[in-house]
Amino acid sequence: MKQKEPKIGAYIDDEERALVADIEGGAELKGKSLLTPERKRELQEIARATINAERTKITIRLSKADLAKLKAQAMREGMPYQTLISSILHKAVS
């Protein structure tokens, strides 16, 4: 079965849409990084806390809309969406 691409465009504003178009068009990003030093440090701490943990593969059912929103948020934060989901779950149980 062929998977459909998420409709991420429905969940982003004009500025984000322009940024996605620039990135997909191969344009170099100018100005400040989207990833602030504080957020980078936070993500690194989360990664360090989970990198050596034994991992288990799971299957989860999400609505298409929620998954598209997660993918859009992950894109904005510069990480794979699975990592974002794992991070959200880790924060919830910690």
Image (cartoon, helix red, strand yellow):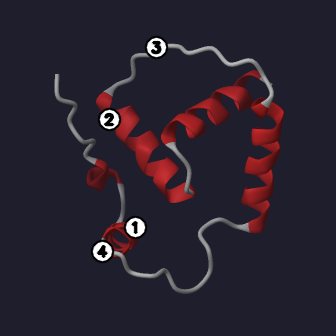
Q: In which quadrant of the rendered image does the N terminus lie? A: top left
Amino acid type of the residue that numbered disc 4 sits on in the rendered structure: Gly
User: Percent x, y for residue 71?
Assistant: 43, 44
What is the distance, in whole Å, between disc 3 and disc 1 at their CAs?
30 Å
Q: Nearer the viewer, residue 90 or 51?
A: 51
Q: Which mark is residue 59?
A: 3
Q: How many discs mark residues in the rendered view? A: 4
Q: Residues within 10 Å of mark 3 (few under 14, many from 20)?
A: few
**Looking at the picture, does residue 43 appear above or below residue 37?**
above
Mark closer to the chain start, 3 or 1: 1
Mark closer to the chain start, 2 or 3: 3
Farthest residue to the left: give it.
1
What is the distance, in whole Å, between disc 2 and disc 4 at their CAs?
26 Å
What is the distance, in whole Å, between disc 2 and disc 3 at their CAs?
17 Å
The residue that appears at 40% across and 43% down in the rendered structure is: 69
Amino acid type of the residue that numbered disc 3 sits on in the rendered structure: Thr
Reading the image, the residue beneath label 4 is: 25
- Label 3 residue SS: loop
User: Percent x, y for residue 54?
Assistant: 74, 18
What is the distance, in whole Å, between disc 3 and disc 4 at their CAs?
34 Å
Q: Which mark is residue 65?
A: 2
Mark closer to the chain start, 2 or 1: 1
**Looking at the picture, does residue 69 appear above or below residue 36?**
above
- Label 2 residue SS: helix
Farthest residue to the bottom: give it.
30
Amino acid type of the residue that numbered disc 1 sits on in the rendered structure: Glu
Reading the image, the residue beneath label 1 is: 16
Mark closer to the chain start, 2 or 4: 4
Amino acid type of the residue that numbered disc 2 sits on in the rendered structure: Ala
Q: Which is more foreground, mark 4 or mark 1?
A: 4
